[in-house]
Image (cartoon, rainbow, N blue to C red):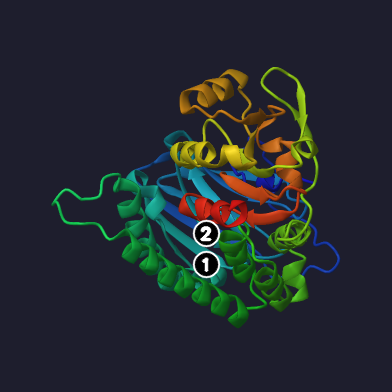
């Protein structure tokens, strides 16, 4: 299976080639060509880079010289696509949907990420979506910040923090967001933006029936796009790794180079935990995971950590520092890890909880939710 992350990893260095491409059979071709007229105030010279992908998922980089604060790109899109425009040396970038239209971009060299983009119908549609979703996501982020920073039972003003109330609000907001996303997708089945929205929201921890319904609501030409293919790939994995299915067996070397097979842990409840030393959320979750392990390890429960590290020493150091006293394996191939690809891991941490027979009984259970599930099955 292809490394799904390579489809959108726009930071990979590639050769500079033309933006023009030939439409594959079954892909809708939009008439005309695009022309981007850009202006970057405060920058009289330099280069601007347009990064996107072709129909095979290959990364493409086009470039244009900045002269007297202005630059121009021209080309043809087989289908609208979210691309990245960047000032390479300044490490500044902005994402937008590119389609065959006259597009105007105005930005300041000091705040390039706030560029104003007009003329792209797909971008206008995405902006409309963001205007509805961003307030909800901002509120979710604010509440999550309160939870993450509340390591003590009181805040700085010594007022009690009602974590249960915050969690109920978060659940309400997440449900509201899902309804908005679903409604947007179903209103726009012929839009590539709808497929991109599905990719952004539902590939990390997909629910099979929901993802299947959204995918099937898309027009055929959108299903055949790169976003559509990514959705289908993850849908197939979600079906194969749904609750009640047997987890695929695997074997990878531990820190001493000795292979450990998942099947060798049969007879215990096993948490398969995908993580990495460089993963901030993983490291933040580790203290609670240590407590969970120590609480249930005497009740036929264990953990096998699958590291997505390249650096063996960084992996070993993280295990020791975080006191992760369970099984650890890695092929040290980073995001090309074979097990990660087989399990369709989109972000880290990702986890699967298995029963004694290797049947999947939980997915992405963290913190108290993992404790609650283990208490249910082990008592």
Q: Nearer the viewer, residue 1 or 349?
A: 349
Q: Is residue 171 above or below residue 189?
A: above
Point out residue 84 in the picture as x, y percentages from the top left corner: 54, 50
Residue sitting at the far right: 25
**Callout 2 touching callout 1 (CB < 8 Å):** yes
Point out residue 57 in the picture as x, y percentages from the top left corner: 73, 50
Query: What residue is at 52 percent from the left and 67 percent from the top?
Result: 123
Query: What residue is at 72 percent from the left and 70 percent from the top?
Result: 222
In this rendering, would 29 be left or right of 49? right
Residue 96 badge: 2
Which residue corresponds to mark 1? 123
Q: Secondary structure at mark 1?
A: helix
Query: What residue is at 38 percent from the left and 68 percent from the top?
Result: 168
Q: Is residue 12 above or below residue 363?
A: above
Say whether residue 101 is visible. yes
Point out residue 331 in the picture as x, y percentages from the top left corner: 72, 28
Point out residue 245 in the picture as x, y percentages from the top left corner: 77, 58
- Image quadrant assignment for residue 64: top right
Circle 2 Cα neighbour tier, 10 Å, few/some/many (<14 / 14–19 / ≥20): many
- Image quadrant assignment for residue 218: bottom right
Give the number of callouts: 2
Q: Nearer the viewer, residue 248 or 263?
A: 263
- Image quadrant assignment for residue 213: bottom right
Q: Is residue 295 above or below residue 327?
A: below
């Amino acid at each position: 299976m292809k490394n799904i992350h390579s489809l959108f990893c726009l930071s990979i260095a590639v050769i500079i080639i033309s933006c023009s491409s030939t439409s594959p059979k079954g892909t809708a071709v939009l008439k005309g060509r695009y022309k981007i007229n850009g202006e970057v105030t405060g920058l009289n010279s330099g280069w601007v880079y347009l990064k996107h992908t072709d129909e095979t998922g290959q990364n493409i980089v086009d470039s244009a010289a900045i002269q007297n604060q202005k630059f121009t790109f021209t080309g043809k899109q087989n289908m609208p696509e979210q691309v990245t425009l960047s000032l390479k040396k300044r490490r500044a970038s902005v994402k937008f949907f590119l389609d065959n239209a006259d597009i105007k971009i105005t930005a300041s060299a000091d705040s390039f990420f706030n560029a104003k983009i007009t003329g792209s119908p797909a971008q206008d549609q995405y902006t409309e979506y963001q205007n509805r979703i961003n307030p909800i996501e901002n509120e979710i982020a604010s509440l999550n910040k309160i939870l993450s920073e509340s390591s003590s039972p009181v805040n700085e003003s010594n007022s009690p923090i009602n974590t249960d109330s915050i969690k109920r609000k978060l659940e309400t907001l997440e449900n509201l967001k899902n309804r908005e996303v679903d409604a947007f997708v179903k209103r726009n089945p012929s839009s590539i933006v709808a497929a991109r929205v599905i990719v952004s929201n539902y590939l990390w921890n997909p629910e099979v029936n929901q993802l299947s319904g959204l995918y099937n609501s898309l027009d055929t030409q959108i299903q055949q796009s790169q976003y559509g293919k990514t959705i289908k790939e993850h849908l197939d994995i979600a079906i194969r790794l749904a609750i009640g299915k047997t987890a695929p067996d695997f074997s990878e070397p531990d820190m001493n180079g000795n292979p450990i097979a998942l099947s060798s842990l049969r007879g215990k409840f096993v948490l398969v935990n995908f993580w990495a030393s460089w993963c901030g959320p993983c490291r933040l979750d580790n203290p609670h995971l240590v407590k969970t392990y120590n609480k249930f390890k005497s009740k036929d429960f264990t953990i096998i950590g699958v590291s997505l590290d390249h650096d063996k020493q960084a992996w070993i150091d993280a295990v020791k520092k975080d006191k992760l006293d369970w099984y650890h394996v890695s092929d040290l191939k980073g995001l090309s890890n074979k097990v990660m690809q087989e399990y369709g891991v989109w972000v880290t941490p990702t986890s699967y909880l298995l029963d004694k027979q290797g049947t999947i009984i939980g997915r992405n259970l963290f913190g108290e939710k993992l404790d609650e599930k283990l208490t249910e099955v082990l008592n």
